[in-house]
Amino acid sequence: MITVIIPTLNPPKRFGLCLAALVPAAIEGLVSDVVVVDGGSNDPFVGELAGEAGATFVKSAKGRGTQMAFGAQDAKGQWLMFLHADTVLEQGWEQEAARFIKHIEIGEKTQSAAAFRFALDDFGVMPRFLEKLVALRCLIFKLPYGDQGVLISKKLYQSVGGFKSIPLMEDVDIVRRLGRSRIMLLQKKAVTSAIRYKTDGYLFRMMRNFFCLLLYYLRVPPRTIERFYD
């Protein structure tokens, strides 16, 4: 039913955990296939790890938007889930996802996409503070991060034009095209790596992310924004 698409580029150690969290859903038949789209990793074991997990490993041009669009082209499932390689879905996510899909397919909900609850794999005050800020952003603006995963029917994905081949803000771009009314927020967590925040400092990284988002809404080209992000 669901094709999971994971873009990779020298993925972190959490990649194995990311794949492992999909196993229960695959056993139940909810996940029909997993496609790992690599953008040019230097690590030759990325493909081996994907293969050992039963995933299809393909290569494309670099860039998350480009890679995810490439992976969606030949997806077997009627539902697509885009997931970052450093994100691990909370146990039981498949049950909530299945309910969401069922409600849409029987007509109880209108066609929409879903994202999981943002969480970080770090301890302390700042990670919890950031999680609350993201929750507030999602509540008010219905603007989840790509780290939260995107669960969407193939029909709706195609109708809005899918992911664009832009170097940055591909998640914000597709969410804007979907619109607030077609974004649902699930309760299960998508636990993502906090390495960027710990490396750069939480406040600095948060301000940088906000600045990049502001530039995007001011219609600054994504390639220009990318310089500030990196």
Image: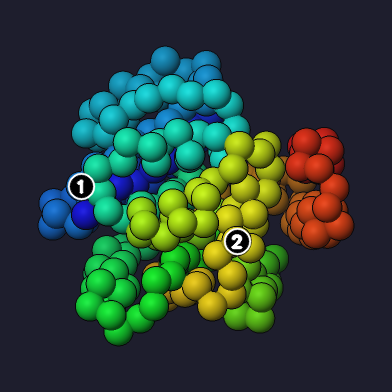
Residue sitting nearer the eye, 65 or 73: 73
Residue visible at 25% across and 43% down? 76
Q: Is residue 140 above or below residue 22?
A: below
Residue visible at 66% across and 39% down? 166
Q: Secondary structure at mark 2?
A: helix
Residue 46 screen position, x and y as percent: 40, 24
In which quadrant is the N terminus drawn?
bottom left
In which quadrant is the C terminus drawn?
top right
Residue sitting nearer the eye, 145 or 21: 145
Q: Residue furthest front?
A: 159
Residue 204 screen position, x and y as percent: 82, 53
Name the kind of residue labelled 2 in the image.
Arg
The label nearer to you, 1 versus 2, is: 2
Q: Residue furthest bottom?
A: 108
Q: Residue furthest left?
A: 28
Q: Secondary structure at mark 1?
A: strand
Residue visible at 28% across and 80% down? 107
Residue 129 screen position, x and y as percent: 68, 72
Name the kind of residue labelled 1 in the image.
Ser
Residue 220 screen position, x and y as percent: 85, 48
Residue 161 visible, this orientation: yes
Mark 1 highlights which residue?
32
Mark 1 residue crowding within 10 angstroms, few (<14) / some (14–19) / many (20+): some
Residue sitting nearer the eye, 67 or 18: 67
Cα distance in 3D space between marks 1 and 2: 27 Å
Mark 2 highlights which residue?
177
In-image side of 194 versus 156 (left or right): right
Q: Is residue 101 above or below residue 29?
A: below
